Amino acid sequence: MSQQILSDATATAVMFAGEVAENSAKQAVQELYNQYGTDQIGACGFGFVTIYGVRANSKVGKALKAIGFRKQEWNRAFQLWNPGSYGGQNVDIKEAGARAYAAKFKEITGIEIYPGSRLD
């Protein structure tokens, strides 16, 4: 398989995976929110996912930008903050969304993606 075909297929998979992974993250966020019953329990913070080793001007990089990832200059990684679009501040719930997003995204694309969180 040529590199061009592989690149096009991966870029298309990224677009599809972004939508499916976001739905998976929203489901995980809702499940944990229902378990807590409120976001007033626990620490405040942020959730995110990170992808390393993708060039910004590649087809995959452009596809990542199209689904909301931003290129971080200081570590040369793509990051997407708040997968699952949770409007509260609970770091546990935001991290659950990040973990669900990362798992589904990697399952579909095979691209190594890392969930993370940071306390506020």
Image (tube, rainbow, N blue to C red):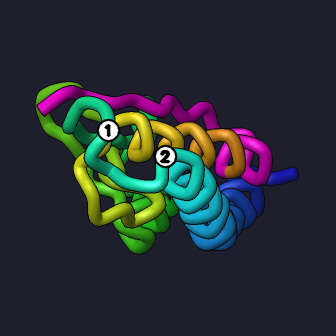
Please state, as top left, top right, bottom left or bottom right, where the C terminus lies in the image. Answer: top left
Q: Does residue 79 appear left or right of residue 13 in this picture?
A: left
Gap between marks 1 and 2 measured at Cα: 7 Å
Q: Residues within 10 Å of mark 1 (few under 14, many from 20)?
A: few
Horizontally, residue 35 falls left or right of residue 67, namely right
Q: Is residue 79 visible?
A: yes
Instruction: Judge whether residue 8 can be spotted in this image.
Output: no
Q: Is residue 108 magenta?
A: yes
Question: Which percent across, then down, holds residue 36?
Answer: 49, 46
Q: Position of residue 88 (x, y in %)?
A: 27, 58
Residue 59, horizontal then vertical, whole percent: 50, 62
- Magenta segment includes 74: no
For the point 63% across and 62% down, which residue is it? 27
Q: Are marks 1 and 2 in contact (CB under 8 Å)?
A: yes
* Amino acid type for the residue under numbered disc 1: Ile
Q: Nearer the viewer, residue 32 or 104?
A: 32
In this view of the protein, which residue sits in the foreground, 108 or 100?
A: 100
Q: Residue furthest right?
A: 1
- Residue at point 56%, 57% (across, down): 34
What's drawn in magenta, residue-wise?
105-120
Residue in the picture at 70% in, 64% down = 13
Q: Mark 2 — residue?
A: 36
Q: Is residue 28 left or right of residue 45?
A: right
Q: Residues within 10 Å of mark 2 (few under 14, many from 20)?
A: few
Q: Which residue is mark 1?
A: 41
Quadrant for residue 41, please give it.
top left
Amino acid type at image mark 2:
Tyr
Viewer-closest of 99 and 107 = 99
Tell me which numbered mark, 1 or 2, is placed earlier along the sequence. 2
